[in-house]
Amino acid sequence: MNKDSIYLITDRQLFKTDLGLYSALQEALKAGVRMIQLREKGLKDRPLLEMAYRLRELTAQYGASLFINDRADIALCVGADGVHLGQSSMPASAIRPILKANMKIGVSTHSLAEALLAEQEGADFITLGPIYETPSKKAYGPPLGIDTLKEVTKRIGLPVFAIGGIKTHNAEAVIEAGAKGIALISGILTEPDVYGTTKRFLQILGESR
Ligand code: TZP
C-alpha cells in the first residue's frame, strides 16, 4: 500500500478546542495517515508557530510528513517536510531556493492551466479540486468533476492529489482517474470514528491500485 495516499489537511474550526483537533489528527496518524498539512488561515504568527511545533512533534512520532500552508518561514523554523502553496502564494520557483534540499513543495490547483503552471514552476506535487461538492463550495468554486481530473493526470507528470468532497464512497473513482492520492478535510476530520474511517480509506486506496 502506498503510505502517502492520504494528505490530511487541518481545520481547527471543526473542533471546540485545539486539543480536539490534535486528538483527531492522532487517531488518523495511528490508523496510517502519513502526510499532514497545517492549514490554519487567520491565525497570528505565534499561535500558528505553536501549532506547527505541536504537529511536528505529533507527526514525528508516527514517521509522518508535515507540510505548512503558505509559510516557508514557519516550515523552516519547525523542521517541516515542506510547504504547500496556494494560487495567491509566491510561485514554487521562488520558494525553492530558500528551502532545505530535502523539502518538498505542494501547490493547490483548480484547472489544467494551473496544474501545468505548477509543474513548470517546479512543484513536487499538486492538489486538484474541488473534484466534488465540498462543504464550503463558495471558497473553492464549483466542482471540476472526474473528467478534468482525468485530463490533468494524463497531461502532467507530477503526483496529483484529488481534493474537494472526497469521501469513502468516491475515493476509488479518483484513483481510477489517475490521482496518486486524496487530500481531504471533512472526509476524515468530521467523522465520529476518525480511526475507523481512515482505515477504510486506506483499504479502498490500497485495493484500487
Ligand atoms: N481546496 C479545494 S477543495 C478544498 C480545498 C482546501 C476543501 C476540501 O475540504 P473537504 O472537506 O475535504 O471537501
Image (tube, helix red, strand yellow):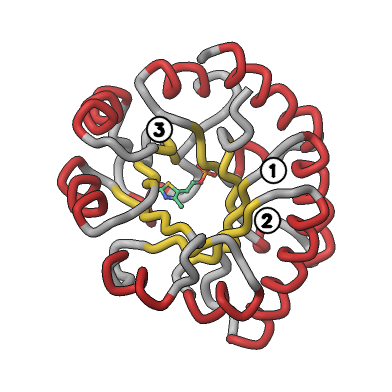
Residue 14 - label: 2
Crowding near pointer 2: few (<14 within 10 Å), some, many (20+)?
Answer: some
Q: Are marks 2 and 1 in contact (CB under 8 Å)?
A: yes
Question: Which callout, 3 or 2, points at the residue further toward the start of the chain?
Answer: 2
Quadrant of the image containing the N terminus: top right
The 10 Å Cα crowd at callout 1, few under 14, some 14 to 19, many 20 or more, is few
Q: Which residue is mark 1?
A: 190
Gap between marks 3 and 2, in whole Å?
20 Å
Query: Residue 43 appears at what percent x and percent y?
Result: 59, 79
* 22 on left or right of 119: right
**In the foreground, 123 or 137:** 123
The residue sitting at the top extreme is: 207
Q: Amino acid at mark 1?
A: Thr
Side of 137 where 80 appears, left or right: right
Q: In the image, what residue occupies the spot 52% across and 23% down?
A: 171
Q: State the residue in front, 130 or 97.
A: 97
Disc 1: residue Cβ within 8 A of ligand 1's nearest atom: yes
Q: Residue at x 42, y 35 (%)?
A: 162
Vertical relation: 117 (above or below) 149? below
Q: Position of residue 173 (x, y in %)?
A: 44, 17
Q: Earlier in the sequence, mark 3 or mark 1?
A: 3
Q: Secondary structure at mark 2?
A: helix
Q: Nearer the viewer, residue 144 or 87?
A: 87
Left or right, 141 with reference to 58:
left
User: Which label was assigned to residue 132?
Assistant: 3
Distance in Å between CA atoms under marks 2 and 1 = 7 Å
